[in-house]
Image (cartoon, helix red, strand yellow):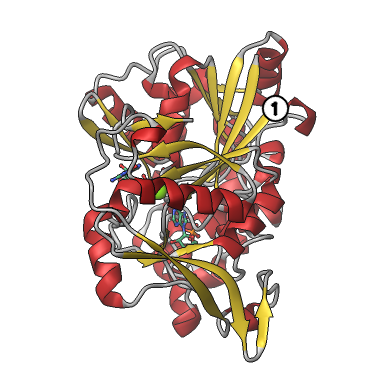
Amino acid sequence: MSVKVVLGALWGDEGKAKIVDFLAQDIDAIVRFQGGCNAGHTVVHNDNKIVMHMVPVGILQPEVKAIIGNGVVIDPIQLKKELEELKEQGVNTKNRLYISSTAHITLPLHLFLDAYKEKQKGKEAIGTTKKGIGPTYTDKASRIGIRMSDLLHPQYFQNRVLNLIRQNEDKLGAWLKKNDVDKMINNLLEIGKELEPLITDTPYLINDMIKDGKNVIFEGAQGTLLDIDFGTYPFVTSSNPSIGGAITGSGVSPQKIEQTIGIFKSYITRVGKGPFPTEMEEETAQEIRKKGNEFGATTGRPRRCGWFDAVLGKYSVMVNGFDSIAISLLDVLTNTDKIKICTSYQYNKEELLRIPQEQQLFSKIKPNYIELPGWKENITDIREFDDLPKNARNYVYKIEELLAVDVKWISVGPNRKQTIVR
Ligand code: GDP
Ligand code: IMO
Ligand code: MG
């Protein structure tokens, strides 16, 4: 039996899906526990690129059970589309996809509210994915949210939706003018009927599997620096992508987790606004963006690019207690003459070895870098660590030393097989 949690260590898009897909080859079940359609998890399956948003990546393995846990927010309309796309790709999800009865629902009006709130914020906008994530979690916390099981009780569902609309009425004027509420409710109830066989009490399901000695992976979305508690608030998402989310979003006790794995990119990217101490100057960023195809998997936005930041890295290792980590997209750094790693921050005359908890400070600090020599050899076909160019190995050793954690996987390309295991 093994229970592993795989988490994004930075600001999301660390290549989690690629590593999860690699690790999922010998598992029984996979669980998503937070986030929703904001996630864009890219895998290459039978030479096709597939981007998953709500369905756990493990569904691509024929026998694996895929579970959408209670902490995920589900947009039923998008989920239906995602399932249709999977079918088109030849992935049969029948009898092995399960949806938590207590997962909250993102309604079309949450998407409107997301865009509306961003507009209201003006210059302070977060740059959300506009998938309704913040408003759905807001309504969950306000205890006016709607859950998957509510879809199975038409009258109750209708009452809840009408109540939710009433509570948000001051902001929904334009939406209400353009949309027919009854039509929306009926459409969702129809989808609810289709999803009914999948809706179940996932805390029991997951715990029973663990009790039966099954191999289970928990697939995180977003990343620790986007965590509503531990991230760069307010420029964060509305859930806990760090380790705590795996527990509250699934109903599994922390004692059951045997391994926590952090996914780092060999550099850093961020989409949306907020502080980013090691952000590269635009010319270098453009090169990396081109080589790494750094455009949002969900929104298509160009990702901001920066150098590896060991201060953030150490913080992420501490908060999550990573047992080991993976470094992805190492191939993208090929042909970079000098590779920088941030080892501390400078705030006026003071050197900081920890990330500032006040956000006002965060945008004022400057990174202190060390520089490592790069390599020119193509590494995308390398499968053994010892076959990597010396400078690539040294880069990995340096990250290991700075973060004081083992680098167990190195990804050198988007395909499952382009993975080095140490
Ligand atoms: P996730 O959200 O963390 O799962 O990551 P995304 O799917 O949003 O972004 C990662 C991108 O990098 C995707 O386009 C992947 O196909 C790609 N990718 C993953 N690992 C590697 C790698 O080692 N090398 C290269 N070149 N691309 C990779
Ligand atoms: P995966 O799982 C990268 C970012 C948005 C924005 C902030 C809040 O693919 O790594 P939200 O829509 O969640 O309210 O947006 O969080 N964000 C992501 N960035 N990867 C993601 O998911 C993200 N999900 C949200 O860009 O800055
Ligand atoms: Mg992504």
Q: Name, please, the residue furthest toward the bottom.
A: 348
The picture places residue 322, in percent across and down from the top left corner, at: 65, 42
Q: Mark 1 = which residue? A: 258
Q: From this viewpoint, is residue 184 visible?
A: yes
Which residue lies at the image location 24% right of the left edge and 57% below the top edge? 335
Q: Nearer the viewer, residue 167 or 9?
A: 9
The picture places residue 5, in percent across and down from the top left corner, at: 61, 34
- The amino acid type, in three-letter code, at marker 1 is Glu
Q: Name, please, the residue furthest toward the top.
A: 212
The picture places residue 78, in percent across and down from the top left corner, at: 37, 41
Which residue lies at the image location 50% right of the left edge and 58% below the top edge? 11
The picture places residue 196, in percent across and down from the top left corner, at: 51, 22
Q: From this viewpoint, is residue 165 visible?
A: no
Q: Which of 371 and 24 is in front in this view?
A: 371
- Left or right relative to 47: residue 114: right
- Left or right relative to 55: residue 283: left
Quadrant position of residue 104: top right
- How many marks the image carries: the answer is 1
Q: Residues within 10 Å of mark 1 (few under 14, many from 20)?
A: few
Q: Which of 302 and 406 is in front in this view?
A: 406
Which residue lies at the image location 58% right of the left edge and 64% below the top edge? 168
Task: Look at the image and tell me in which quarter the N terminus lies.
Answer: top right
Which residue lies at the image location 70% right of the left edge and 57% below the top edge? 142
